[in-house]
Amino acid sequence: MSSPETTPPAEYPALPPPMGQVYNGQLSKAIFFFFAFSGSIYLITEGHPLPFGVFLPFIIFSNMIDAFRSATLINARGTAKAEEEDDIESPGWGIGLAVIGLLILLNNLGWLRLSALVPYWPLLLIAAGLVLLRRSLQRKAGNGTSV
């Protein structure tokens, strides 16, 4: 007596982090997350595992949260919830891409050594903390509206 054949569960290929942004039609965000992800992997392999090993999971999870949040806001367009929508494609993404491109160009031309900037990575944490603090204070002053 032969046993019935069972099909294995469907397996999906692993996709790189910015595919959610590509699906949402947010190319600048996708490019930014791609360079953040691949740049972190590159810097980990270059011998800087401590800060960039911590950044890698943060980039992956923030990418997933951003893609979900953006998709929710896109789907809510035309409803009352759309009033809460912020700029999905803000100029900050373009500025970020331009800065990354400039840094890579300067490194490739030999005018800047990116590995020399590694000791200063905590400045990114300080800047992010100051931005979050500023936004929080602005929300309090504006009765909960974000700026």
Image (cartoon, rainbow, N blue to C red):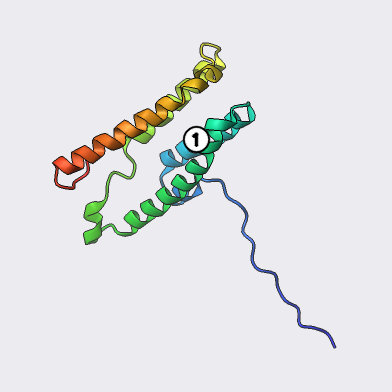
- Residue at position x 24%, y 61% in the image: 79
Q: Is residue 16 above or below residue 100?
A: below
Say whether residue 132 is visible: yes
Question: Residue under circle 1?
Answer: 36
Q: Is residue 123 above or below residue 64?
A: above
Q: Within 10 angstroms of label 1, few (less than 14), some, or many (20 or more) residues?
A: many
In the picture as drawn, the residue positioned furthest to the bottom comes out as: 1
Say whether residue 95 is visible: no
In the picture as drawn, the residue positioned furthest to the right comes out as: 1
- Residue at position x 42%, y 50% in the image: 65
- Residue at position x 52%, y 37% in the image: 54
Q: x, y (%) of residue 8? A: 70, 69
Q: Nearer the viewer, residue 31 or 60?
A: 60
Label 1 sits on what residue type?
Ala
In the picture as drawn, the residue positioned furthest to the top comes out as: 111
In the displayed structure image, the side of residue 98 where residue 113 appears, left or right: right
In the displayed structure image, the side of residue 143 where residue 56 appears, left or right: right
Q: x, y (%) of residue 28? A: 42, 38
In the displayed structure image, the side of residue 45 where residue 40 appears, left or right: left
Q: x, y (%) of residue 41? A: 59, 35
- Residue at position x 34%, y 34% in the image: 129
**Image quadrant in which the N terminus is located:** bottom right
Helix, strand or loop under label 1: helix
Q: Is residue 64 above or below residue 5?
A: above
**Image quadrant in which the C terminus is located:** top left
Total number of numbered discs in the rendering: 1
Q: x, y (%) of residue 142? A: 14, 43
Q: Quadrant of residue 47?
A: top right
